[in-house]
Image (spheres, rainbow, N blue to C red):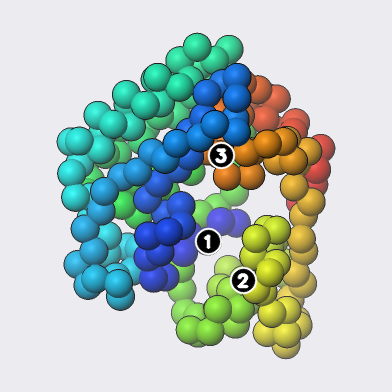
């Protein structure tokens, strides 16, 4: 189950409207691919409220840079198909949340993921960070919350325990230990390893 946090506050310093790209031969040499956004309520804007400031320009930039970096990859066909879905979304909507969700779904589909996707704005949850995540976990009738390495720094397990829930910290794939891989877009791995190779890399670290 993937709960899309579409009603949390937008953080311009995070990866919510941008990603890092790198050459196939050197994942440590990275540059930002940023989609300019309009925040209707300034810093108080929620992710679902964000609008693309320049949809046409964003579409051209995404297409150009992804082709520039990954078209020589051995699995370019899979990468290209995923990116085409994102480009179509950029043409059909000006909502950043919709485009971001499409981009993740496109990669997950190529990895054979068959889970369910829901949005936090459709569920009832409190405001405090850890309690909110615990509420969302319970709202989708899950028993375990999977927390990444970054989230482990701030997560408070007490609200989960109080609701009878478990928190797990799956180990990251070995690939993330290489220079730059922790911050790099998954398109690099999809282009170099292909769907099967990337799936095996993830499954070798954790089975959920």
Question: Looking at the image, do the residues carrying marks 3 and 2 touch, with CB atoms under 8 Å apart?
Answer: no
- Helix or strand or loop: what does disc 2 sit on? helix
Quadrant in the picture for residue 165: bottom right
Q: Name the residue at 45% across, 43% down.
A: 19
- Split into 4 quadrants, where in the image is the N terminus? bottom right
Badge 2 is on which residue? 137
- Nearest the viewer among 80 and 38 is 38
Q: Which residue is drawn at 63% across and 44% down?
A: 182
**97 left or right, relative to 36:** right
- Can residue 24 be seen here? The reply is yes
Give SS at disc 1: strand
Q: Estimate the spatial distance between the alpha carbons at disc 3 and disc 1, rounded to whole Å.
A: 22 Å
Among the two numbered marks 3 and 2 on one chain, the one whose residue lies closer to the N terminus = 2
The residue pinned by badge 1 equals 3
Element at badge 3?
loop
> Crowding at label 1, few (<14), some or many (≥20) Cα neighbours within 10 Å?
some
The location of residue 132, given as percent across then percent down, is 55, 79
Q: Is residue 185 above or below residue 172?
A: above
- The residue located at (64%, 65%) in the rendering is 151
Which of the 4 quarters of the picture holds residue 193? top right
Q: Earlier in the sequence, mark 3 or mark 1?
A: 1
| Residue at mark 3 | 184
Q: Distance between the residues labelled 1 and 2?
A: 8 Å
Above or below for 145 versus 32: below
Residue 94 location (% of width, % of height): 22, 49
The image position of residue 196, as x and y in percent, is 68, 24
């Amino acid at each position: 189950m993937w709960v899309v946090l579409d009603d949390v506050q937008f953080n311009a310093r995070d990866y919510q409207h941008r990603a890092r790209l790198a050459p196939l031969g050197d994942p440590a040499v990275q540059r930002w691919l940023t989609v300019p956004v309009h925040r209707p309520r300034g810093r108080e804007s929620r992710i679902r409220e964000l609008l693309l400031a320049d949809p046409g320009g964003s579409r051209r930039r995404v297409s150009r840079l992804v082709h520039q970096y990954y078209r020589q990859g051995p699995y370019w066909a899979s990468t290209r198909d995923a990116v085409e879905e994102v480009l179509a979304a950029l043409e059909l909507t000006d909502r950043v949340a919709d485009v971001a969700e499409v981009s993740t779904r496109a990669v997950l589909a190529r990895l054979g993921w068959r889970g369910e996707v829901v949005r936090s704005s459709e569920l009832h949850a409190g405001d405090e960070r850890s309690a909110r995540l615990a509420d969302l976990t319970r709202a989708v009738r899950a028993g375990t919350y999977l927390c990444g390495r970054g989230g482990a720094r701030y997560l408070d397990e007490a609200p989960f325990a109080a609701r009878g829930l478990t928190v797990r910290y799956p180990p990251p794939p070995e690939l993330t230990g290489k220079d730059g891989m922790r911050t790099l877009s998954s398109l690099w791995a999809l282009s170099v390893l292909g769907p099967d190779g990337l799936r095996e890399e993830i499954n070798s670290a954790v089975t959920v």
